[in-house]
Amino acid sequence: DQQVKQNSPSLSVQEGRISILNCDYTNSMFDYFLWYKKYPAEGPTFLISISSIKDKNEDGRFTVFLNKSAKHLSLHIVPSQPGDSAVYFCAASVLYSGTASKLTFGTGTRLQVTL
Amino acid sequence: DAGITQSPRHKVTETGTPVTLRCHQTENHRYMYWYRQDPGHGLRLIHYSYGVKDTDKGEVSDGYSVSRSKTEDFLLTLESATSSQTSVYFCAISETGTDGGQPQHFGDGTRLSIL
């Protein structure tokens, strides 16, 4: 039972254009969402997060949008650069759920930014 | 970069042998986590720790045990390795648990192959 879903395994975008990565979740208790970026042979690197009290959060070229009614979030990268080529993981957690904030990850989307 | 070191980085072993993976942090963070990454599953939580000698199970804890005798070290043990435990293992740390929504930061992983 995949509670966090990334239905697009891969995405190819031209340099300079917008990349949009999507994520859906089924657990209505999730109230904190994160995006991680992963290069081969390295660990995931935190990119940006959003709590359920917001519907948008921006950090430079990266913006995350949250639609709670649709249980959907998306990551926008504008403009896309070749160095953005990586696997992107969406993750979700329930704050105040116990002893630690346990993350539930999606299966990842491989983004390739072409010249 | 968060000061997280995983050792070994690569290991090949045989079915039935015990295996211990080590995660060492220099950040003095209270929370530590072990995940495994497999194709089609993203990252899944194995065990986590919320303090010295305080640990709990994650989503896929069967066949694994953990120990944390010092703040800086979190050990993951496969008592009798099976081929289904072939995976890439990631350690993560975070400063806060449920009260701050702080992101987890990951080490570079251990690639474990069980023949």
Image: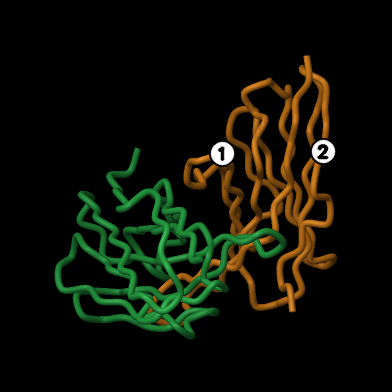
Q: In this rendered view, identify the residue nearer to me: A78 or B56.
A: B56
Q: Nearer the viewer, mark 1 or mark 2?
A: 1
Q: Is residue A54 above or below residue A29?
A: above
Q: In this rendered view, identify the residue nearer to me: A111 or B40.
A: B40
Looking at the image, tell me whether mark 1 or mark 2 is earlier in sequence order: 2
Left or right: where B70 falls relative to A55: left
Question: Which residue carries the number 2 mark?
Answer: A11
Determine crowd level at label 1: few under 14, some 14-19, many 20+ residues with C-alpha closer than 10 A.
Answer: few
Left or right: where A52 falls relative to A94: right
> What residue sits 47% from the left and 81% below the top?
B61
Left or right: where A74 falls relative to A57: right
Whether pointer 1 and pointer 2 mark residues with C-beta atoms closer than 8 Å, the reply is no
Question: Which residue carries the number 1 mark?
Answer: A40
Viewport quadrant of the N terminus of chain B: top left
Q: How many marks?
A: 2
Chain appearing in orange on the rendered image: A
Using the image, name the chain to which the residue with label 2 belongs: A
Using the image, name the chain to which the residue with label 1 belongs: A
Residue A113 location, x and y as percent? 75, 25
Please tell me in which quadrant of the rendered image residue B104 appears. bottom left
Identity of the residue furthest to the top in this view: A115
Q: Is residue A65 above or below residue A107?
A: above
> Which SS class for mark 2?
strand
